[in-house]
Image: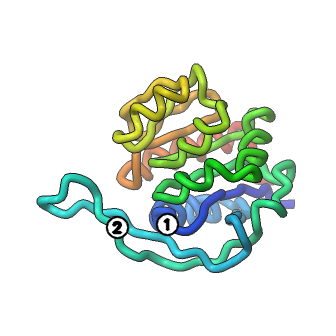
C-alpha cells in the first residue's frame, strides 16, 4: 500500500504552493490527496510582485478538483500533511474539520509542511506555541501572537514541522520535507 499525504487547501490558495508539493510528492512515490471544504473544483490564484506595488498582486490561477471534503478525511490514513498558502488559510483556520485534521497530525507527531499563509492554520490550533516557523514575512506579528518564533528562512525545520516563507523557497522547503519523509514516513 502506497503511503498517502494530504494537502489541505481551498479556493484562493496560491497555485504554485499547491502544485509544487503535489507534483514533487507524487514524483517521490507518495499518493497525494487534496482536501477542501467540499469535493468540488477549486479556483487557485497566482500571487506575484509588480513594480510600484507595495504588496503582491493576485490573479486567477489554475482550477483543480478536490479529492475529498474535510468532513470525509480520516487523518489516520495519511503519513503527512501539507498546508499551502495564499488566502485560503485565512478562512480555513476557522473550520472545525480543518482543526480536527491538523490536531491529529500534531498529536501523532507526523510530518507537516507549511508555507506562506499556511501557518495561520497551525497557529489557530495552538500547535505552534513554543516552536519556530517561517511564514510570509508580513505574518511575523501573527506568528508571535500565536506563541511561536518567526524565522525568516527558506526551510525552517522544527521537529516534524517544515516551513517556508513563500513559493520562491520551494526547492529548500521540499528538499527538507522530503528528507524528513524519508526518515519518518518512507514510501513502501
Q: Nearer the viewer, residue 129 or 105?
A: 129
Tell me, yes or no, whether the two marked residues, 2 and 1, touch with CB atoms within 8 Å. Answer: yes
Q: Secondary structure at mark 1?
A: loop
Q: Quadrant of residue 2?
A: bottom right
Horizontal relation, residue 163 to residue 81: left or right: left
Q: Looking at the figure, which quarter contains the N terminus? A: bottom right
Colouring scheme, one of rainbow, by chain, secondary structure, one colour:
rainbow
Q: Residue at x 35, y 63 (%)?
A: 47
Res. 89 mark: none
- Residue where numbered disc 1 is placed: 12
Q: Residue 147 location, x and y as percent? A: 54, 23
Q: Residues within 10 Å of mark 2 (few under 14, many from 20)?
A: some
Comes first in the chain, label 2 or label 1 = 1
Q: Nearer the viewer, residue 141 or 15?
A: 141
Horizontal relation, residue 185 to residue 118: left or right: right
Horizontal relation, residue 72 to residue 131: left or right: right
- Residue where numbered disc 2 is placed: 58
Q: Residue at x 44, y 52 (%)?
A: 170
In the rendered image, the vertical position of residue 129 relative to residue 93, given as above or below: above
In the rendered image, the vertical position of residue 177 relative to residue 85, given as above or below: above
Q: Residue 186 location, x and y as percent? A: 74, 47
Q: Could one spot residue 16 in this view of the protein?
A: yes
Q: Quadrant of residue 99?
A: top right
Horizontal relation, residue 148 to residue 39: left or right: left
The alpha-carbon separation of the residues under discs 2 and 1 comes to: 9 Å
Amino acid at each position: 500500500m502506497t503511503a498517502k499525504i494530504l494537502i489541505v487547501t481551498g479556493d484562493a490558495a496560491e497555485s504554485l504552493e499547491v502544485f509544487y508539493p503535489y507534483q514533487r510528492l507524487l514524483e517521490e512515490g507518495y499518493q497525494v490527496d487534496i482536501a477542501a471544504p467540499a469535493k468540488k473544483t477549486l479556483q487557485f490564484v497566482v500571487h506575484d510582485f509588480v513594480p510600484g506595488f507595495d504588496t503582491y498582486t493576485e490573479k486567477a490561477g489554475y482550477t483543480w478538483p478536490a479529492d475529498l471534503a474535510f468532513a470525509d478525511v480520516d487523518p489516520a490514513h495519511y503519513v503527512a500533511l501539507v498546508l499551502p498558502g495564499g488566502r485560503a488559510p485565512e478562512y480555513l483556520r476557522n473550520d472545525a474539520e480543518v482543526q480536527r485534521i491538523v490536531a491529529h497530525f500534531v498529536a501523532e507527531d507526523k510530518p507537516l509542511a507549511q508555507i506562506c499563509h499556511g501557518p495561520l492554520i497551525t497557529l489557530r490550533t495552538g500547535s505552534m506555541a513554543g516552536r519556530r516557523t517561517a511564514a510570509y514575512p508580513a505574518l511575523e506579528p501573527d506568528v508571535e501572537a500565536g506563541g511561536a518564533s518567526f524565522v525568516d528562512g527558506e526551510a525552517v525545520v522544527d521537529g516534524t514541522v517544515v516551513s517556508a516563507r513563500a513559493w520562491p523557497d520551494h526547492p529548500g522547503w521540499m528538499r527538507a520535507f522530503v528528507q524528513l519523509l524519508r526518515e519518518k514516513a518512507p514510501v513502501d
